Amino acid sequence: MVSRRRALKLGGAGLAVVLVLAVVLVAALATTGVLAAPTVESTQSQWGAVEGQTTGIETSVTVTNPNPVGIPGLLTVDYTARLNDVTLAQGAEQGVGFGTGTNELALTTEMENARIADWWVTHVNNGEQSELALTGTVSGPGFSRAVPADRTTIETDILAGFTNEEPRTVTIRNESVMRISDETATWGEADAEASPIRFSSTVENTHDYDVTLDGVEYVVTMNGVRLGQERRESGIDVEPGETGELNVTVDLETAKMADWWPEHVRDDERSELRVEMYGLVDDDGERKRVPMRLFEKSLTLETDMLGDGATSVEPMETPTNGTDFADPEVTGTSQEWGAVTDERTDIETTATLSAPEQEINDLLTLDIEQRTAVNGVRVATGSTTVGTVTAGETQLSFTSPMDNGETPEWWARHLNRGEESVVATVPTATADVGITKFDTDLAERRGTTETDVLADMNGERDETITVDGREALTVERVQSSWGEATPETAPLDVRTTVSNELPARMTITDIRYRVTLNEVVLADRKAPNSHRIPGGETRTLPIAMELDNGKMDEWWPTHVRNGERSRLNVTVIATAESRLGSERRPLDALGQNSTFETDMLNATDGE
């Protein structure tokens, strides 16, 4: 232990009793005329051994006796040390005397550490101000004399270090959650049980979600001695952009001051006071601590109780109040079609959620939503909740009902994009960490699926049409393409190159067409135009077809039930008229009977 020594003049705080003892002793002998008065050269004091429940006080007085003979040890010294009228120590020395020349007078007493707890109550209730009073009595054969008290004022200002008007930011995941300002701390009425400190602060929600606390847990230590730890019902519920008041009463256990005091003395009357506050949230009826400090402050307190009573309180550097956590990740996903009805088609998703080992997992819950869009048209939404996030991998399963009624919209865009569709599945999660929520982006999946529905309606042809037994028309080529589709209509532009094999003019009239997809009739109507071809000439004839795109919601369930396979059937029947007569014939060159397939849920990576 490092001793504290301080040279004091006569009447100095801490050793006044011993000093006055010498004065009284000299006065008693000097009045008889027998001896010259000894002089007190200096006094020194220090804390002694800290053992069990007591702390020693050791006093040394240097006295010069100018007489040629010693003064016999016939005197008794009684002395008392009080703080705010709380008796810290009492002692008595008997048989006190002086030899010739310089003498060292050593006085030793023990202070019960429990008395520090009694003093602390008076110190707090007196506005952190105390008076140290040292008194004594010197007696000998035939006399007794009281020593006037020597008084020293001891003042501290511990709570000033907890007052802060400047705002500070509390973060989670490096995102600002709240701004705390106007922090104040005041003492309540201390007693033998508790020394209350009332903390008050203004809380501003700087986050996008409500900030809610169901309570607060605090821990107060001084030099490693826990003075208080408890949970309070103090809570807040602040909406984004709003402010609220957080008021917490912290009770220091008064009796624990007796445990703190020996540590304070051992550390040369220097202590570190640390206050920490954590938020509490209700999790299924259980209060859990949010691993985030609402408040943390450390101060150093230094005293000189046996010296001049000087004290100091200095704030220590406070760490940033923040908590980090890593977002869970979806590391693998598979999808397949589930139940299919006329109105909806279920997408069954199985995903692997990977989460790191971290303290906040105990509070973390995830609400996961998955949205699937085809060509920007949202077709399906599904969700699931992960009530407890555990470190490692967790398998998730959920269903996203796909609205068949959206098929005409995305299919129209499919046609307008050159029979190409972008399938995007975007999972998002809302992470609830108890005190608030965070939006968490999970890995988006995008792919491209393509079809070529008109493949068999394009290319070279060699189809001959006869009228009255003679070769009349030859179909040489067919070129088909989609017009600008809408959710209601899918125009189909068919251009066919034909040659009139007769010397006379021929007219193509009454062109009728029928288009089905998996037996769903998309068109069964007559083309609006007719065509004349001069004898011996070749013409490219435009044939405008129009499909009912609104029927695609009927087609889609049949497509999925058939393993995403559909059969397209196009039938064209026309009437050819010439001098030879009139004949109604199917134009096989313009027709089609083909199959196409898709794999929408496992579309290849695309844009």
Image (cartoon, grey):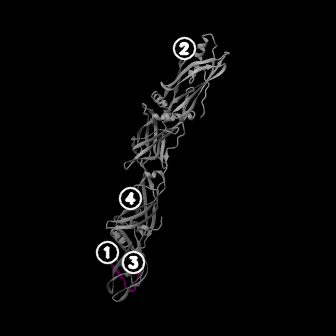
**Label 3 secondary element:** strand
Q: Which mark is residue 383?
A: 4
Can you say whether 381 is above or below 548 in the image? above
Cα separation between marks 1 and 3: 18 Å
Report if residue 507 lies within the magenta region. Answer: yes
Q: Amino acid at mark 3?
A: Ser
Nearer the viewer's eye, disc 2 or disc 1? 2
Q: Which residue is mark 1?
A: 524
Cα separation between marks 3 and 4: 38 Å
Q: Quadrant of residue 9?
A: top right
Q: Which mark is residue 143?
A: 2
**Label 4 secondary element:** strand
- N-term-proximal mark, 4 vs 2: 2
Can you say whether 396 is above or below 547 in the image? above
Cα separation between marks 2 and 1: 136 Å
Range covered by the magenta-colored residues? 495-510
Cα separation between marks 4 and 2: 96 Å
User: Callout 2 environment at 10 Å: few (<14), some (14 to 19), or many (20+)?
Assistant: few
- Asked if residue 256 can be seen in this view, the reply is yes
Cα separation between marks 1 and 4: 42 Å
User: Callout 3 environment at 10 Å: few (<14), some (14 to 19), or many (20+)?
Assistant: some
Q: Amino acid at mark 1?
A: Asp
Residue 39 place in picture, x, y as percent = 63, 17
Q: Amino acid at mark 2?
A: Phe
Cα separation between marks 3 and 2: 132 Å
- N-term-proximal mark, 3 vs 4: 4
Can you say whether 509 is above or below 51 in the image? below
Q: Which residue is mark 3?
A: 594
- N-term-proximal mark, 1 vs 4: 4
**Label 1 secondary element:** strand
Q: Is 396 positioned to the left or the right of 111 in the image?
A: left
